[in-house]
Amino acid sequence: MGTPGHDSDLLQPLLDGDRRALARSLTLVESRGPGFRNLLRGIAPRLGRAHRVGVTGAPGVGKSSLVAALVATARNNGMSIAVLAVDPTSPFTGGALLGDRVRMTDHVGDEGVFVRSMASRGALGGLSTATGDALDVLDAAGFDLILTETVGAGQVDVEVAHESETTLVLFAPGAGDAIQAMKSGLMEVADLWVVNKADDVRAEKVRADLVGSLSLHEPPDDLEERVVLTSAKDGSGVGDLLEKLCARRAELESSGARGDLARGRIRRRLTAAARDLVSERLLGSAADSLIDAVVTGERSVHDAAEDILRTDDGGRS
């Protein structure tokens, strides 16, 4: 029997939908605590139910407001939703600066909604390095829809697409020119482009500019359908956006593209996990002799790297 909070105590309650176990499991994988690999190994057979949707865009476009509106609309349609909000890291505590206490207070007490803030910890791409594992935990907990909201760091936020099956890139009137946004790198990762704050009279022009800009690079047949007007303020267009997300999920399933996306996602995560393991070994005292061997010319850097990869780490947690 494990100690309270150990992975052996968390797995079954997590799979059964216990929210306390879910919160503790997320803490375990984010902190890389003892047993986190066992927990991830245990949930592996239960992955694949949730539709993973990334929400990104420059600061000021209303990402959090739209996410809250999407959650409300999805709940009205009987869906369960988890939100993973990747926030800037506090320079004092290392935790998320914003925190889930300021998000979606209307859904407090709703068992069909779970909100978690995760510190980016300086990770490139607007996502924390543990985000992929956290999304797996949320998936195993049985949610229909998982929304990952990024920090909003502009062009580096494209990493959200690597952990998502569908990526929404948001724009808003007064929050940047649509044509200039083509240079940001965000445009290429989008599956749907969303012009938020549609209650603003300038929103239609932003949408027209986007369609015009995208027509230079995207197939024109469904472009109009993929640029969506929404207003988190009055709710207009949010139902249409949810319908498009559901249609996208069905299309991915029927075409087999969902499996391809999963393979690509896992390939990138395998590379990152291997890189992390090598970094851990380089920080250990066992690497000192290899470093000395390179300094003295007895080994090359590449030979030493191969030695590290061949070295067993003495067991896995």
Image (cartoon, rainbow, N blue to C red):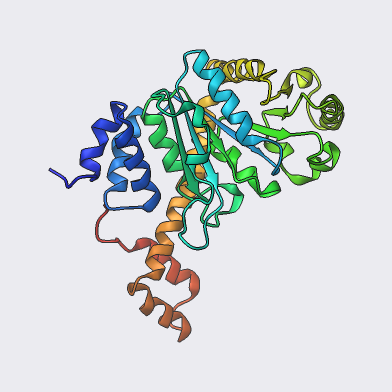
In this rendering, position of residue 97 left or right of residue 48: right
Q: In which quarter of the view is residue 202 placed?
A: top right
Residue nearest the observer in this picture, 50 or 314: 50
Residue plotted at (59% across, 53% down): 124
Q: Is residue 1 above or below residue 255?
A: below
**Image quarter of the N terminus:** top left
Residue placed at 68% from the left, 21% from the top? 234
Residue 66 at what x, y percent from top left? 63, 29
Q: Which residue is drawn at the image coordinates 68% and 25% (left, top)?
A: 233
User: Which residue in the rendered view is the most extreme toward the bottom?
Assistant: 296
Residue 313 image position (x, y, % from top left) = 29, 61
How many discs mark residues in the rendered view?
Answer: 0
Q: Position of residue 174 (x, y in %)?
A: 81, 38
Depth check: give the residue in front, 304 or 254.
254
The answer to whether residue 31 shows anywhere in this view is yes
Is residue 307 visible in the rendered structure shown here?
A: no
Left or right of 107 in this view: 61: right
The image position of residue 51, as x and y in percent, is 50, 25
Residue lying at 50% horizontally and 27% vertically, measured from the top left: 106
Identify the image quadrant of residue 122: bottom right
Q: Is residue 116 above or below residue 166?
A: below
In the image, taking residue 118 as reference, residue 315 lies left or right, namely: left
